[in-house]
Amino acid sequence: MSLATLIQLIFQGLNMGLIYALAALGISLIWNASGLFNFSQGDLLTIGGYIMLTFFSFLSLPYPVAFLITIVIMGIAGYLLSKGYFYPMFQQNFNPQIILIGTVALSVFIRNSVLLTWGPNAKTYTNPFGSKPLALFGVNLMPHYFWNIVIVAVLVLALQMFLKGTVIGIAMRAVAQKPVAASLMGVKVGQMISLTFLLSTGLAAISGILIAPIIPLTPEMGGLLAIKAFAAALIGGLGSFGGALVGGIIIGIAEVFFATLVTSTYKDVFIFAVLIAFLMIRPGGIFRADISEKV
Amino acid sequence: MGKIFDTIKNNILIVIALLLALIPVIGVPSYQFYIIERGLQNAIIVISLVILLGYTGQLSLGHAGLLATGAYTYGILVVSYNVNPWIAFLIAPIFTALIGALLGIPSFKLTGPFLVVTTIALGEIVRILILNWEKLTGGPYGLTGITSIISNSKLMFYLILIIVYFISVATSRLSVSKIGLAFKAIKEDEVAAEVMGVDVKRYKLLAFTISSFLAGLSGAIFASLTGYLNPDSFTFADSATFLLMTVLGGMSSVPGAILSSLAVTALPEILRFMARSRMVIYSLVLLLIIRYSKQLSSVKISKFFLKKKNKEDLVVGGGE
Amino acid sequence: MALLETIGLVKRFGGLTAVDHLDLQVNEGEICGLIGPNGSGKTTVLNVITGIYKNDGGKVIFNGKEIHILTPHEICEHGIARTFQNIRVLGSQTVYDNVRLGLHIQTKSDLFNIIFNTKQVREENERIRKIIEEALDIVGLRKEKNEITKNLPYGKQKVLEIARAIVAKPKLLLLDEPAAGLNTAETENLMEIVRNIRKRGISILLIEHEMAFVGGLTDKVYVINYGKKIAEGTFNEIKKNPSVIQVYLGTKGDE
């Protein structure tokens, strides 16, 4: 393999990886805040992609405007979802397994809604960053590679600053770490969980937007993407911010290399096998995630 | 009056079976007849989840993969290898049980979402293998020309009914037995179970194996009923639907599982007048059922059966 | 020969040594106490003996066999049963079924017999019913046998756990703070139950903070602190032991 191909593949993998990472980050945030593993994250991503398609491609709004509208819509949807659906179930002490199954039902619901609204055919729209590869030092790289990296980097930094530097962010982290203590200190736990959902669906929407130039939109696309995002979150260490990023990048790059060097037919099988093996050997993931039970 | 009600309650499985047995006699239009058959076939996989999730507390979102394993094993044996359908019908669940036992191994170490993700991954692996192993499975074009175990559709219906009835009785007995109690102990407190002498790994493996056997059986019936197999019938959404049927049936009630399978299988057909939006309505209904499952549980059918089940426990336990 | 013997038992959690070269002996027919301040490693000792934790050094010998290499269910089969500090009963099952769990290793029904509800299964159910009712009589829960366990008051759940343990026919019963949270009447009743259990030939090792309970029941007491044994002897002997007094009172015992 030439150095040029190597760089090419790394960029390609990094791109997919960052999208997985964003989705995984959403999963980890909700897990931390509420102990719920959101199985509908992949389908939230899908619907984000379709909303973007509507505003950007059908309504021809400028890219940044459509981008913003999509995130706002999805964020509000996430907030309402938590307020109206998931948080009441926490409050009423539902069996956690039932709430988890609720996210599964949500996933099925979103998939059917997307199918009804936008139809079964794959949809693409013009790549806003241009579809002509840039030739840099003999390596052909798509412009969206760079844009995606920049957008994700800015986003991750902003999110870190929000969580560490603002009152709301600190309250959200307090709820995640010590919910009882936080509520005794006057933090509104329900509100914080709902805000976490808002962030998480917003992140899902961004992954849905960024993935559009890479793979076409279909109602079922969330299924496979979700498992990659789950894999990223679990391999990195569920609940860990850095873990989600590292996990996503590992999955993205491993996938691209396997597809190129071995076979693209079984690249998903390869990733799932890696995930299962990883969980068996190191269930807590790369970063922490203490899942052992105390006696 | 109350006495009659009690008798019905205590023999609910027989009552359901007898009512269903009337269906071919009164003559139902063939499509509706097929839907009822499919409902019963789904009941088997839902009972398999009752054992795994309701009793043992292990959540699987990979059961569509197991259903596919059973269905394709039957289909491939019958179509490509000219195996006698009855023999294929026997091999399919056994082979699925072996595959499913593999699914049980991660459960030794993993719990909660960690295990669920593993089951999803294994389900997807099965689907991708089917999709790409074209020589054997027909790939995306599907596998056609699968002969049914019994060509007479009424006899086929009775065969399925007998199988479902037998499985229901066996599962109810399992529930109150030593094995069922070990399963429930694992669900509630693995440490307590282990310390009281339950080999937790072995029993988890057993739960996965029994569950997969039933899933494979359901798959073989599916193949036999449809005569055609396609990877699209075995997606994550299907696994999710089986899970939702299980929850709706009350998670650990066998009669509840049968009724919810019949109802949920028929629901898209009942909603048919809504044409394209029916699947959305259908999944919305499922969402609402979960959201209000606690409120529903004070009145819903499953509670009715759960109460009855507790009584059964006592009967086997000797009563007062 | 001792029924249970730990030799140089070590258990570490990261840098912390929770059990530090501990030697214990429980002889057949004895009731032994294991006491020490909070966090001294008592429960860890039980967790290592029952195989929930793997030891980092030393041996646990039970009935002449090294059991520290076994899994918890195997250790149960060898004849050790236990209760937990924070009761671990099956809350959503009946009282009857909770005791039935204790009979797991003695129940022989296999899948085939269960599915066809053979005579063997029916006879076994009948046999089991008698054992369970007898055990419920011992702890005084016969009336509550069909209740859902989580609806029972705390004290009854605690003795239910004991009933579950004794139907397993253990040679040794480990009790982790059996009297904690019980009122005086309940504690006295519990002492009677424990004496009854000993009469049935079951040896007992118990952890307890309630000194009247320990004094009234035990033949021998081990005192540990920071995982190390600091004293052993009868309750009256250790009561006067200066290092024990120092550990419990935090000062040097002058008298």
Image (tube, coloured by chain):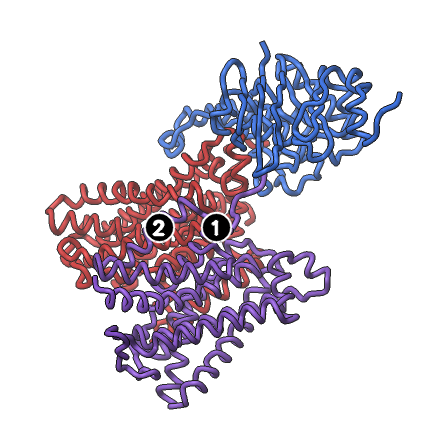
Chain colours: A purple, B red, C blue
Quarter of the figure with residue C208? top right
Give SS at disc 2. Answer: helix
In this orientation, which residue lies closer to the viewer: A8 or C43?
A8
Query: In the image, which disc is placed on residue A203?
Result: none
Q: Which chain carries label 2?
A: B
Quarter of the figure with residue A117? bottom left
Q: Quadrant of the C terminus of chain C?
A: top right
Residue C55 in view of the camera: yes
In this orientation, which residue lies closer to the viewer: B36 or B55?
B55
Q: What residue type is labelled 1?
A: Gly
Q: Position of residue B217 (x, y in %)?
A: 28, 46
Where is mark 2, residue-wise?
Answer: B45
Q: Which chain carries label 1?
A: B
The crowding category of the residue bearing disc 2, from other C-alpha atoms within 10 Å (few below 14, some 14 to 19, many at least 20), is many
The residues tagged by marks 1 and 2 sit, at their Cα atoms, a distance apart of: 21 Å
Where is mark 1, residue-wise?
Answer: B112
